[in-house]
C-alpha cells in the first residue's frame, strides 16, 4: 500500500530551536509539495519540486525556512530558528506530473504537527 | 493566496440527504480537484475534472465545472455519517509549472 510517509508526526520545541521535517514520497512520483495548514490561513503552499528541482518556493519565508530533496526518496523542510507563529501542521504530498500538463492528483502524508513554545 | 473559495463554509445535514458544496475561482484553470480531510488526518483526493469537462461521477460523488462562471460544485448523494469531514476545492492554473492551490474548505457534518 503506497503512501507518503512524514516524520515526525508531532514535534514540540522551544522558540529559536531548529526543526527538520522529513518526507518520503511515493516511489515513482516525480513531484513533491510542502503545505502548511493553520486555522487562520488554511492550506498554504510553501515549496514545490519536480524531478527534485525546486520550481516554486515563493510561499516560503526564505530567512528561516529551507526545503531540499537530497534524493528522490527524501524531501526535507527545515526551520531555523523556529518561532511560535510557525506552529501549524505541515503536509508533504507527492504526485506524478509530466511538464506542461499541470498538476494531477496528489497523495498526502498524515502531516507533522509542530508546536513552537 | 487561495485561488478557490468554497461555499458554504459549514454544512450540517441528516444522513441520507444530499450535500452540495460550491467552489469559485479567479483565473483560468487546467483542472480542478476536490479533496476530503478527516479530523487530524491528511487530505485524500476525491475527484479531478479537467477544464474541457463539464461533469464527472465517482460513486456517490458528482462534480460539475462551469468555466464561464469559474465555478464548480461537488454533490454527495445519500450522505452517511462517515462523510463527515472537511472538503477542499483545489485548482491548477494554466501553465507548465502550475501548482495546486487550495481553498479554505467546507466543514460537512452528517447527523446519524
Image: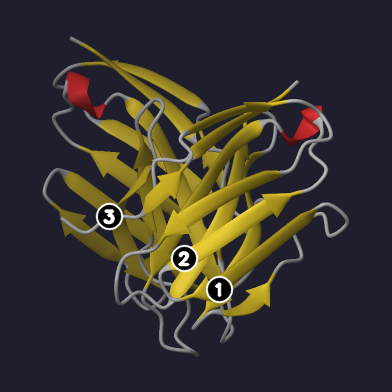
Residue matched to label 2:
A74
Q: Are marks 1 and 2 in contact (CB under 8 Å)?
A: yes
Rendering coords of residue B17 (x, y %): 19, 23
Residue matched to label 3? A3
Residue located beneath label 1 in the image:
A70
Give the CA distance from mark 2 to mark 3.
13 Å
Q: Is residue B24 above or below residue A39?
A: below
| Residue B43 seen by the camera | yes
**Which chain is home to disc 1?**
A
Q: If you read the primary sequence from the N terminus, does the residue marked by circle 2 or circle 3 appear first?
A: 3
| Chain hosting mark 3 | A
Say left or right for A29 vs A43. left
Q: Residues within 10 Å of mark 3 (few under 14, many from 20)?
A: some
Regarding mark 1 in the picture, which secondary structure is present there? strand
Q: Position of residue A37 (x, y in %)?
A: 59, 39
Image height of B34 relative to B21, above or below: below
Q: Nearer the viewer, mark 3 or mark 1?
A: 1
Residue drawn at 33 percent across, 57 percent down: B64
Residue B59 x %, y %:
11, 49
Q: Residues within 10 Å of mark 2 (few under 14, many from 20)?
A: some
Q: Closest to the observer: A43 or B84?
A: A43
Q: Are marks 2 and 3 in contact (CB under 8 Å)?
A: no
Q: Quadrant of the C terminus of chain A?
A: top right
First in sequence: mark 3 vs mark 1: 3
Crowding around mark 1 (Cα neighbors within 10 Å: few <14, some 14 to 19, many 20+) is: few
Percent x, y of residue A53: 59, 82
As helix, strand or loop, the secondary structure at mark 2 comes to strand
Disc 3 to disc 1, how far (Cα)?
A: 19 Å
* Residue B69 visible in the displayed image: no
Amino acid at each position: 500500500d503506497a503512501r507518503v510517509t512524514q516524520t515526525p508526526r508531532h514535534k514540540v520545541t522551544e522558540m529559536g530551536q531548529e526543526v527538520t521535517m522529513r518526507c518520503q514520497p511515493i516511489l515513482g512520483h516525480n513531484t513533491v509539495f510542502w503545505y502548511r495548514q493553520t486555522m487562520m490561513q488554511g492550506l498554504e503552499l510553501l515549496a514545490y519540486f519536480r524531478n527534485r528541482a525546486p520550481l516554486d518556493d515563493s510561499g516560503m519565508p526564505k530567512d528561516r525556512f529551507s526545503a531540499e530533496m537530497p534524493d528522490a526518496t527524501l524531501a526535507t523542510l527545515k526551520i531555523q530558528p523556529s518561532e511560535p507563529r510557525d506552529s501549524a501542521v505541515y503536509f508533504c504530498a507527492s504526485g506524478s506530473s509530466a511538464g506542461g500538463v499541470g498538476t494531477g492528483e496528489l497523495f498526502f502524508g498524515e502531516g507533522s504537527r509542530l508546536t513552537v513554545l | 493566496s487561495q485561488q478557490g473559495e468554497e461555499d458554504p463554509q459549514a454544512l450540517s445535514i441528516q444522513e441520507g440527504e444530499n450535500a452540495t458544496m460550491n467552489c469559485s475561482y479567479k483565473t483560468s484553470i487546467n483542472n480542478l480537484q476536490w479533496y476530503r480531510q478527516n479530523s487530524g488526518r491528511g487530505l485524500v483526493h476525491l475527484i479531478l475534472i479537467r477544464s474541457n469537462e463539464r461533469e464527472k461521477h465517482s460513486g456517490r460523488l458528482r462534480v460539475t465545472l462551469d468555466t464561464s462562471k469559474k465555478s464548480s460544485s461537488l454533490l454527495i448523494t445519500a450522505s452517511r455519517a462517515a462523510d463527515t469531514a472537511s472538503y477542499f476545492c483545489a485548482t491548477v492554473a494554466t501553465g507548465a509549472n502550475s501548482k495546486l492551490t487550495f481553498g479554505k474548505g467546507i466543514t460537512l457534518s452528517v447527523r446519524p
